[in-house]
Amino acid sequence: MIEVRGVDLHYDGRPVLHGVDVTLSERRIAVIGANGSGKSTFARLLNGLLLPTAGTVTVDGHDTRRAGRVVRRRVGFVFQDPDLQIVMPTVAEDVAFGLKHQGVPRAEIAERVAATLDRFGLSELADRPAHLLSGGEKQLLAIASVTVLEPACIVFDEPTTSLDLRNRRRTWAVIAALPQQAVVVTHDLDAIAGFDRALLFDGGRIVVDGPPAVAVQEYLALLDALPDCG
């Protein structure tokens, strides 16, 4: 369970989040809102990539300020741009990277890497240079490299933004099938219809917390109220 209590966050003295207070316990949670609304900043708080200026973020009781390593074992993070987290030369080496840093025995690493590559349809690409993969394959590799670590929750920051329709559908199918809790920042409003909950951010605050249909309706109303830039 992730608990965010009274969180403010400032960048260079500029307020980005204000008084965010929420508990995340559902299996599938969407985070929506316009660019600059604070949603991606919120996502980065959940596993300690960012720390709050005020307030606390805890994961199963572990404060992100004091127990960052423990928190990141429980909460994985998939970036919008998979190149930001692909760090090893080949596909198999990249999936194995985090396990080696956790001190997992070599035989277990080989077993878990093979199972994960098979699960994501990447087995035939095991020895392929990671930087030569297509955009969709890179996103699958990024997800595989996080899931192999078996976190309890995975946070996705706009995972389908740069993908074509086929790969967007495949990525959403992968997210739907994950056994872990997933918190997904997205502009793909149709894809979150089956989620358990949605948070709508506006001006650095959660302005709607409820069923996806309600949050999307309110988001569209906010967009309709904006002045015409044409």
Image (cartoon, rainbow, N blue to C red):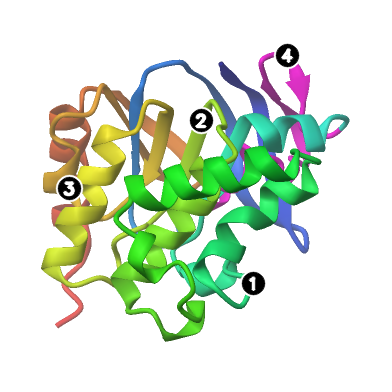
Residue 126 lies, in percent from the top left, at 45, 67
Q: Disc 3 or disc 2, which is closer to the eye?
A: 2
Looking at numbered disc 3 in the image, what kind of residue is underneath it? Answer: Leu
- Which residue is found at the position 72% from the left and 45% from the top? 106
Question: Which kind of residue does numbered mark 1 sit on?
Answer: Met
Stretch in magenta: 40-65
- Residue most extreme to the right: 66
Helix, strand, or loop for circle 3? helix
Q: Is residue 230 above or below residue 33?
A: below
The label on residue 189 is 3
The residue that mark 1 highlights is 88
- 25 on left or right of 51: left
The quadrant of the rendering that contains the C terminus is bottom left
Q: Earlier in the sequence, mark 3 or mark 2?
A: 2
Q: Which residue is mark 4?
A: 61
Q: CA distance from mark 3 to mark 2?
A: 21 Å
Helix, strand or loop at mark 4:
loop
Q: In whole angstroms, how far apart are the C-alphas of marks 2 and 1?
A: 24 Å
Q: Is residue 25 magenta?
A: no
Amino acid type for the residue under numbered disc 2 = Cys
Q: CA distance from mark 2 to mark 4?
A: 14 Å
- Residue 197 at what x, y percent from top left? 29, 24
Q: Residue furthest front?
A: 107
Q: Which tag is nearer the camera, tag 4 or tag 1?
A: 1
Which residue in the structure is indicated by mark 2?
Answer: 153
Q: Relative to the observer, which residue lies in front, 98 or 9?
A: 98
Report how far apart the C-alphas of labels 4 and 1 lie in the structure: 33 Å
Estimate how packed mark 1 is, as few (under 14), some (14 to 19) or many (20 or more) residues with alpha carbons within 10 Å: some
The 10 Å Cα crowd at callout 4, few under 14, some 14 to 19, many 20 or more, is few
Q: Position of residue 34 (x, y in %)?
A: 33, 57
